[in-house]
Image (cartoon, rainbow, N blue to C red):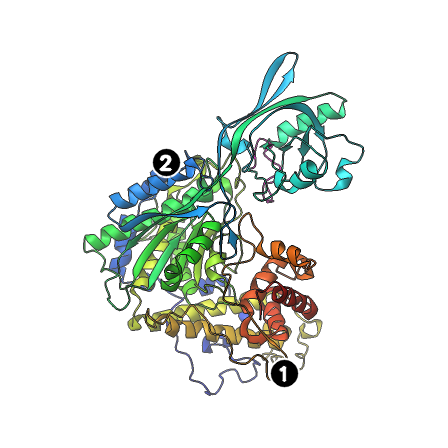
Amino acid sequence: MRTQPRRSKGAASACPDQPVRLAPFACISLTLISRSTLAHTLGDTPPLLPEKEVAALADELSGETAMRSLEGLARFHRQRGSQGFHAAAELIAERARAYGLSNVQMLQFPADGKISYGTQKARQAWDAEEGELSELRDGTEIKIASYAAQPIVLAEDSESANVTADLVDVGDGTQVSDYAGKDVKGKIVLVAAPAGSAQDIAVGQFGAAGIVSYAQNQKTAWSGENDNLIRWGHLESFSPHKTFAFMVSLRTARALKDRLRGSATIKLHAQVTAGQHAASYEVVTATIEGADPKLKDSEIAFSCHLDHQRPGANDNASGCVTILEVARTLQKLVSDGKLPRPARTIRFIWPPEIEGTVTLLNAKPEFAQRIKTAIHMDMVGGGPDTKAVFHVTRGPMSLPSFVHDVAWAFANWVNTESYRFAAGEAADYPLVAPEGGKEPLRAEYSGYTMGSDHDVYQDSSFSIPSIYLNDWPDRYIHTNFDTAANIDPTKLKRAAFIGAASGYFLASFSPRDVASVKRAVEIGGLLRMAEMLGRYPVPVGARSGASAPAGGASAPAGGASPPGPASAPLAVLSALREHERSVLNSIAAYSSSAAAPANHRRPHSSATGRDGTPLFHRRPDPRGPLMVFGYDYFADHAKAAGIPTPRLLSYEGSWGTGEEYAYEALNFADGTRTASQITAALTTEYGPVPEELVTEYLRALQKIGLME
């Protein structure tokens, strides 16, 4: 990630037999260049920033300070609009003020279950006072679950109830066949599925009084190994079939199921005081003001999500306290004169996950106009016991940007320094916290994955490139074991460094940085190309010295045909070349003035392509991704219009799912592409997809008024 000059347009190729020109140093067969070789091309010096500034960041950032804040946040049950969320927001705002940040605010946006912000229908707030589930046995109550002890046991959006009823096992609980021959009316059902998935059929169709769910956590290799885990659960916010639900461990569920199979009658007593109510989304925000009068209205945003069940330590107290530590560090170093004040403003945002970000960018459009890049942290502190792998995740191909290569430059350098330290070698910047571990970071530079607020920023409504720092897998995600004890202060410090260095560099970016950024893009592009070519198998005819397929790369002297370019379709290679050109061009776009932001693409002036086929263009409103949080904009409007579910939504591609295809199909509909061209773009990114499925989805979007 840093300075290799590109050949000017029209220059002779140094690889005349290659079907697609790559950067000059990429002419070597990509299969002969190991990932580790690429990783160490930068040498020992810190990337992009002067070493004096890197040293200041490394010295000031504190994993322990972040950890103390995390321990505070993990005390609160932080559901959207709740008293616990408000307490957590107050803690963040108080510390932001104490650290000297500017414009510290707690913004409030009405959430009454009716108002919409772009594609997000604002869910009402949810609070709970009590929730106990007990078994009545031999005249005594044996407690099974207690909200007071572990708030995670009461599913979010549960309603008040005082029910005594028999328990009936209905298996998964999501199909009519699960209830065959079982009388569940007025009873409590035991389900293996998430409570919200069984809600409408169990309560709405068969009249159950409530739900007990033992749904397992998001699947990893460790799923089911610890049968004491209790997974966070939720009911459907907009379901007309209001009820309550308790979450129990696999061990508890197995004991209940065994007794029911033995013809035992299990009578449960559920006491719940909880419910939805009109309130507000709360979003804490603060800034470090930029120094350049012409650029200060252009912002670099640090994002996280503040909501989650207690304890929710890695997900996502870790991201929230890490950007807080970045804020403290940058503010102090700027105030102390150890770092020049950046040209652009740096903003910090603590919202509820996804719904808060969609709300903020719609209710405060000036934020969307000002933010040029977002650095989003969602789970960045998992210690060794979580089994977490740390990712620097790139953006979608619909939004090419150099900013991801900037983040990887710093992350890769931390990889090298931390590995040398762990291996007993000399390392000037191991970034080890006194109370933390000494393991190497081993961050991965990963392709785009969905699932957090970065989806909102990078949606075509806003087109804000986002650096996404995240742990996956994490065997304790969304469970009662996601505790502060499993968080590593060293990991927090390293994540904070990568974020702080990237954000500060981008906020200070000037023409003098173009050469080093171009080199970062060259290296990032080579990694992307190698990853993409690795997805294509080597043709049989290209092995053992056989000649290359027609149109492919010729075989090198004395060896077999290189499997990369020879085996990948030329159209894919051409698309990758154009993508890398766009990544490089984004450097100039980023350098544009704040008055003409680069994050809003203009539609093509024509309604049809050159061959007369229609061009698809997303309408400007509503803004936001279609699958948000607790509300599915597409499903809601398609149902009202009588549109069947498009097949694309359930399509499984070579390395992409239906949700990813649908997200990018909408993003690629920028007024310059036909359905065929959108299909080609999706094929490059996620693997081959039938054009008829893409067209069907685009036409469905047109019918609900999202496409023209």
Q: How many labels, in total?
A: 2
The question of residue 227 being in magenta is answered with: yes
Q: Is residue 105 visible?
A: yes
Query: Closer to the observer: label 1 or label 2?
Result: 1
Q: Please state the extent of the stretch shown in magenta in the rendering.
A: 216-231
> What is the quadrant of residue 182 in the picture?
top right
Can you name the residue that lies furthest to the right here?
A: 181
Can you name the residue that lies furthest to the left here?
A: 337
Residue 453 in the image, given as x and y percentages of width and height: 47, 53
Q: Is residue 156 left or right of residue 285?
A: right
Identify the residue shown where x is 45% and y is 85%.
9
- Tell me, for residue 432, which label it has, or none: none
Residue 594 in the image, given as x and y percentages of width and height: 33, 68
Identify the residue shown where x is 53% and y is 69%.
529
How far is the residue under mark 1 from the one under mark 2?
A: 61 Å
Vertical comparison of 17 with 676: above or below: below
Vertical comparison of 472 with 605: above or below: above
Q: Which residue is mark 2?
A: 72
The question of residue 458 being in magenta is answered with: no
Q: Is residue 425 visible?
A: no
Q: Which is the main secondary structure of the residues drawn in magenta?
A: loop
Residue 637 in the image, given as x and y percentages of width and height: 61, 57
Amino acid type assigned to the residue bearing label 1 in the image: Gly
| Quadrant of image for the C terminus | bottom right
Label 1 Cα crowd, 10 Å radius (few <14 / some 14-19 / many 20+): few
Vertical comparison of 560 with 8: above or below: above
Q: The residue tagged with tag 2: helix, strand or loop? A: helix
Q: Is residue 201 left or right of residue 520?
A: right
Viewer-closest of 638 and 312:
638
Q: Which residue is mark 1?
A: 612
Amino acid type assigned to the residue bearing label 2 in the image: Gly
